[in-house]
Amino acid sequence: MGLVKKDDFFREVTIRIFSSLDTKTALACVFEYMSRYFPLDALTYAIPDANQKALRRIGRVGNEHSDMIDDFIPVSKQLMDMMQAFIRQNRKTFIASLAVPEEHMLLADPLFKLRNNSDISLPLFNGEKPLGWLHLRVAGKNKYNSSHVELLETVRQPFSIALYNALSHEIVLNNRDKLMDNNQFLSNELFQSSLDKIVGTSSGLKNVLEMVQQVAPLKNPVLILGETGTGKEMIANAIHFSSKVKNGPFIKINCGAIPENLIDSELFGHEKGAFTGAITEKKGRFERASGGTIFLDEIGELPPQAQVRLLRVLQYHEIERVGGTHPIKVDIRVIAATHRNLEQMVSENQFREDLWFRLNVFPIIIPPLRHRKEDIPDLARYFVEKKSASLNIKQPPPIAPGAIKRLLDYDWQGNIRELENLVERELIKYRGGALMFDSLPLNREIESVVTSHAIDGITSTLTIDEVVSLHIAKTLNMTKGKIHGPGGAAEILGINPNTLRTRMDKLGIEFGRKKRHWI
């Protein structure tokens, strides 16, 4: 060991340990200096983490071929209790082979290989609270002595401050991520309010809401099934905000929106250097959602390798970052959703059967809007209020009675999302009066007319314009030519009177005094 004055050693170590905000970078700088005075193969912080049931290591391993690490070594509860008791009772620097009791050695050696290496540890504290150790290691036995102990003891304070600052900085970053992911309290209030308005007392979603109430307090996975636009995310919101972890993070991810080559890194995170471009470590969505809920929308789009990783989360409640070597425990509730037939995908080997069984414990099936048309009037009025506010329309306009019938007659292949978009389109065009919803796609209108009336058995020989003409003519006969006002043809057809007159003129249908009989 080279000779150095304790004051000089303290000054140089302090300068180096505070030279970078990145803990691993700072330790690498210290490693280079301390290796002049200590036999040294590895320099790490060792931090007992009872929540993860693991010992966390941060630092540098290796000399000529060095490797920066930040990993977790799983330990038993017995060993964790022993480590925490040992650090509380032993506040001074110690050589492991001389200070660690034999019963500790028996438990620790299979994991940490203490017997075939030399280890010296400096306990670190924030006041009276233990933080962990600064741990030095070199291959071979009996490489450290009392001179090493005395020299290392001089730098307890700078290393303690540096480790405390690093852990505090991590907490700040984690809290920032949580705030970015979810403003949970405001979202809860807004969601509960909107849920009441949308669903009301309708029987269409009664069974679904009963299932939400049953499953919300539990932690088992939930699978939400339904066509695109039926409100699967709304139901996921209801489950999370009615659960015991409603104040925890709520992370949402669309599995079909992430490129296949990035999905593992996005969901499970990666270590620094795991692949080209991984210049820093990254926590994945699962790790960030720990203590709360993750919502995997379009789970049917998840590629095979990610399905394997998800299965491990459901089975063992742990993830492993891309490029990582040790598992990380996560306390998480998984909600998945899809519009696809997963059972059929399993039979076609497109989705793992074991993952399907794990997810399908409590499936919730949301009926399409065309199967719960009793919800349409309330939904339409809710969207009128909501969109009027966003478009700065002070007084939400009423919906014409004929327009409600028109909405009920429509088949809504796009479900609630299509209805919401239709309302927004009508309000953008709104210039006063009641909403008529005369912008429903013409092809659906014609299909409805043909199906409902069969046009005296000759529909196959008529053009679209002829079908529309006949339908308008029959309506005019019913109203005795009345177009405008209550009971008029425009109200029955659910369109604006001026729009009806324009269409009649285009189709050559006379109105007013020009014509008294239309069929």
Image (cartoon, helix red, strand yellow):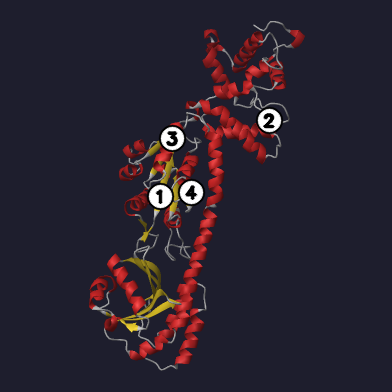
Q: Which residue is under mark 3?
A: 208
Give me the C-alpha separation between circle 2 and circle 3: 31 Å
| Marks 2 and 3 close (CB-CB < 8 Å) | no
Q: Secondary structure at mark 1?
A: strand
Secondary structure of the residue carrying tag 2 is loop
The residue where tag 2 is placed is 397
- Can you give x and y, in whole percent of width and height, for residue 389 in the image? 66, 39
Q: Between marks 1 and 2, how big is the CA–CA gap?
A: 42 Å
Residue that label 1 marks: 333
- At label 3, the amino acid type is Val
Give how far apart the Cα atoms at labels 2 and 4 are: 34 Å
**Earlier-in-chain disc, 1 versus 2:** 1
Q: Nearer the viewer, residue 517 or 372?
A: 372
**How far is mark 3 from mark 4, CA to CA?**
21 Å
Residue 252: give its label: 4
How dense is the environment of label 2, judged by Cα within 10 Å: few (below 14), some, or many (20 and up)?
some
Real-space CA distance between mark 1 and mark 4, rounded to the nearest whole angstrom:
12 Å
Residue depicted at 62% across the width and 23% down the height: 403
